[in-house]
Image: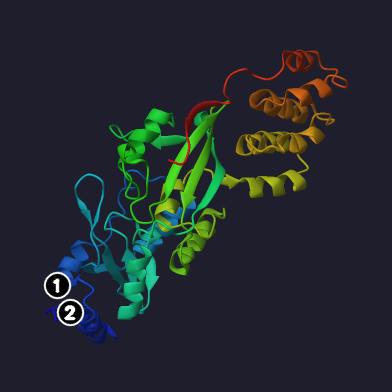
Amino acid sequence: MSDSHWLDRFDGFAELREAVDGASLDIAWVDSEDEARDQAPDTEHMPMGTLWTQGVWELNLEMARHKLLVATGGYALLNGMGLDIEPAWYIDEQDPSKIWLAASSSVPPVYWIDVELDADAMRDALQSLMPPPEEAPRKQLRAIMGYEQGLVVPNVYSGQLEEASPEALTNFWIFSPFRFAVMHGWMTYFSRSWAGYDMHSGRLYIWNVDYVPAPPSHQRVVRRVSDANGFAYPEDMPIDLLGVVVGFDFATAELLQNQLEDTPDDDFLASVIVGLGALRYDDPDLDELIRPYMTHESESVRRAAFHVCYSYGLGDLMQEALASETVEDLREWLEEGPAEDTPLIWELPWG
């Protein structure tokens, strides 16, 4: 057993250390309390390669309080640049009733997994961060990410916020603690999730994510982040994929469909129609979704429906709408017919 007796003042830790050492988990306990305090999580700066909402950052600060690094190890994964990623273990010195697993020391506290003080539970938590087997069933989702002109990311050289162009996003994510650099296919380190995007007309980004649904330990993290964010992410999303998408929009077709049925505001309805069109642009039933809005009483709603038809090749609907449309510039648009080129300005499906 290690000589880390300073930990034994916390209830259950003498027994935990003995059980962990006996279970051959390859975990090394921090030797001194001074070292544990020196390596407490840094909250002075937002980590590079991550975005934050106000609520999630405030939760991160709260979770970092009173945390001490007590151990490292349990696995070693390559980060795509020849370096090993090693997990880190923390406790809250004011509430040491559980131990917190950070997938790596670069992962912010808000994404840590809470683990019982039990060697088997620690083994299970480590296993939840291991790459899944190739045959594991995967889930694919599209979601609205946001418009380029409405998204910003930190410039990797100056730190100043800049418009989230594809080039800016590429540079930003190179420094992410959650995913491989672009040359490795935009795959997350631990769950091997894919996170890519398309850009549609109007410079609208659409997420394309592909992942193995996560275990309950990750789902607790997702719920915690969703509550702080005021927006619900898919509960089965792995935590490293969650760390990639937080700070951007993530509005799925299911969410927009519910908003389509509930919203009384015509301008908001128009934006939902455009978003649903982008998410379902290759759906053979897209015309049935859009048809009711081609003759809507609101011009902004009709304009949104015409935009979807123009962008995604629904020429028959455009011809149908000519029979009732009276606004001259909209008639001209309908007479022009759908765009001849691809609906995607920039495409990178599934990573």
Q: Residue at x 28, y 55 (%)?
A: 42
Which corner quadrant holds the N terminus?
bottom left
Q: Residue at x 57, y 23 (%)?
A: 342
Which residue does the numbered mark 1 point to in the structure image? 32
Does label 1 or label 2 sit earlier along the sequence? 2
Which residue does the numbered mark 2 point to in the structure image? 6
The amino acid on which the numbered mark 1 sits, given as a three-letter code, is Ser
Q: Quick one: SS at disc 1? A: loop
Query: Could you tell me if the residues under marks 1 and 2 are in contact, i.e. CB atoms within 8 Å?
Result: yes
Q: Residue at x 64, y 19 (%)?
A: 339
Q: Quick one: SS at disc 2? A: helix
Q: Please state the horizontal and vertical placement of residue 65, each as a whole percent of the image.
A: 34, 65
**Residue sticking out furthest to the left:** 3
Residue 86 drawn above or below residue 324:
below
Residue 147 drawn above or below residue 80:
above
Residue 28 drawn above or below residue 111:
below
The amino acid on which the numbered mark 2 sits, given as a three-letter code, is Trp
Which corner quadrant holds the C terminus?
top left
Relative to 72, is 140 on the left or the right?
right
Nearest to the observer: residue 30 or residue 275: 275
